[in-house]
């Protein structure tokens, strides 16, 4: 596994927000009853891990939830693109779940995503996933700015402005 620079980590997360939002839309439209049950059960696991304050296990299982959503989408191009974006590497390298308030925010976002998929609200599912990953990108940006590691290659825009 290669190390990813901080600016690239933000770019990967931004790109994931587009691909995984599309996958969430299709999951809401195409997921089988079995896949919906598995998503719901996995959300319950994340809720237990959060309640137990096991944030590293939560981070690992977060990855599994995203994989389940991609699978439930039955959209092979989105799956292939997501795999190529190396989201795992970003998650493990930066452990953003340990940032103050991120675990609670992440859980609320996951609840919204899964509930939207289960109720077949494809627009809400797509919006929720995009927001979830953009929030992650913003947290990465904040973390990097706090450590003054972005240097001259720092993006001039604010990610929050792009959401509007």
Image (cartoon, rainbow, N blue to C red):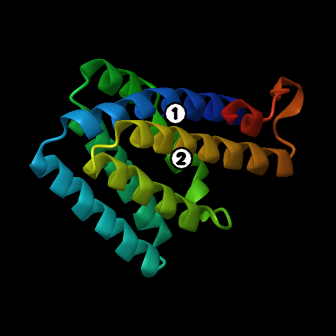
The residue under the point 52% across, 33% down is 17
> For residue 49, which quarter of the picture?
bottom left
User: At 30% across and 69% down in the image, what residue appears?
Assistant: 44
Quadrant of the rendered image containing residue 81: top left
- Relative to 36, is 87 above or below? above
Percent from the top left, x then y, of residue 21? 44, 33
Callouts 2 and 1 close, C-beta under 8 Å: yes
Q: Image check: 41 left or right of 133?
A: left
The span from disc 2 to disc 1 (Cα, nearest Å) is 8 Å
Q: Which mark is drawn over residue 100?
A: none
Name the one closer to the observer, 16 or 31. 31
Residue at disc 1, secondary structure: helix
Q: Position of residue 24 (x, y in %)?
A: 36, 37
Quadrant location of the C terminus?
top right
Q: Which residue is at the front of the view, 84 or 122?
A: 122
Q: Is residue 156 above or below residue 99?
A: above
Q: Earlier in the sequence, mark 2 or mark 1?
A: 1
Q: Left or right: where does residue 14 sit relative to residue 18?
A: right
Q: In front: 28, or 98?
A: 28
Question: Which circle marks residue 17 in the picture?
Answer: 1
- Secondary structure of the residue carrying numbered label 2: helix
Which residue corresponds to mark 2? 132
Rendered location of residue 105, percent (x, y) = 57, 62
Residue at the spot 62% in from the left edge and 35% down from the top edge: 9
Q: Quadrant of residue 84?
A: top left
Residue drawn at 19 percent across, 51 percent down = 36
Residue 45: image location, x then y, percent: 30, 68
From the viewer's perspective, is residue 126 above or below residue 38? above
């Amino acid at each position: 596994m290669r190390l990813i620079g901080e600016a690239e980590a933000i770019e990967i997360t931004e790109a994931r927000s587009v691909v995984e939002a599309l996958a969430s839309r299709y999951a809401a439209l195409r997921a089988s009853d079995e896949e919906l049950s598995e998503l719901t059960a996995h959300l319950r696991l994340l809720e237990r891990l959060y309640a137990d304050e096991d944030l590293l296990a939560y981070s690992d299982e977060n990855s599994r939830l995203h994989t389940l959503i991609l699978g439930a989408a039955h959209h092979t191009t989105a799956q292939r693109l997501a795999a190529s974006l190396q989201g795992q590497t970003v998650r493990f390298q930066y452990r953003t779940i340990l940032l103050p308030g991120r675990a609670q925010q992440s859980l609320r976002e996951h609840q919204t995503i899964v509930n939207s998929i289960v109720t077949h609200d494809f627009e809400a599912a797509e919006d929720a996933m995009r927001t979830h990953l953009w929030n992650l990108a913003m947290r990465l940006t904040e973390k990097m700015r706090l450590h003054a590691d972005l240097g001259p290659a720092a993006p001039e825009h604010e990610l929050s402005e792009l959401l509007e």
